[in-house]
Image: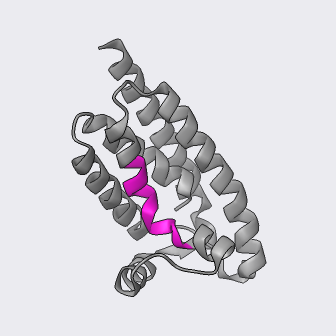
Amino acid sequence: MFITNHVLAGAVAGTVFRDRPVAAFGLGFATHVAMDMVPHWGNPELGRDGFYAVAKRDGLLGLATVALITAAGVPPRRALISGMAGAAILDSDKPSEYFFGVNPLPRWLDRMHKRIQRESPEGMRVEVAGGVALACGAAALLVRARQR
């Protein structure tokens, strides 16, 4: 899944567990695992450079999404940020390897993450539909939390 979709799912987790940052992190992490088990986009024919071209765009959109959601969130924002962090942490290997040449994840966790992936070039529809649904759901929950 695109990191942006994971961030949106983490925002939902952080909003649901608004006063429980540890639970929000855990639910965010669980959403990442569940989402990666669903068939989604990935194209092994792109190669390393092609992958990083897509990942850079998605990473920037994901960072912008984190900033927008954090700004839109209702204080305290600890759970909101924890949910997004939990949802994104499994993909921390990609920017870390790109910028620093090091994978910060323990090997067992990285192997598990690679094993659960269900990627295919045809999975873009799932990515887009999932992103739209998650953006709408996160926005609705954030608006509702602001109205309280």
- Most frequent secondary structure within the magenta stretch: helix
Q: Quadrant of residue 56?
A: bottom right
In the depicted structure, whether residue 116 falls above or below residue 63 = below
Q: Is residue 98 left or right of residue 111?
A: right
Q: How many marks?
A: 0
Q: Is residue 95 magenta?
A: no
Q: Position of residue 12 (x, y in %)?
A: 36, 40
Q: Is residue 88 magenta?
A: yes
Residue at image point 31% right, 52% down: 25
Q: Position of residue 125 (x, y in %)?
A: 58, 56
Residue 39 visible: no
Q: Residue furthest front?
A: 100
Residue 69 visible: yes
Residue at image point 51% right, 28% down: 71
Q: Quadrant of residue 64?
A: top right
Q: Is residue 126 left or right of residue 52?
A: left
Q: Which image quadrant: the C terminus?
A: top left
Q: Residue furthest top?
A: 147
Q: Position of residue 8 (x, y in %)?
A: 47, 44
Q: Nearer the viewer, residue 80 or 124?
A: 80
Residue at image point 55% right, 51% down: 4
Q: Is residue 87 left or right of residue 1?
A: left
The way the protein has been coloured in the rendering is one colour
Q: Position of residue 67 (x, y in %)?
A: 56, 37
Residue at image point 50% right, 38% down: 135
Q: What range of the chain is rendered magenta?
A: 83-93
In the depicted structure, whether residue 4 falls above or below residue 113 = above
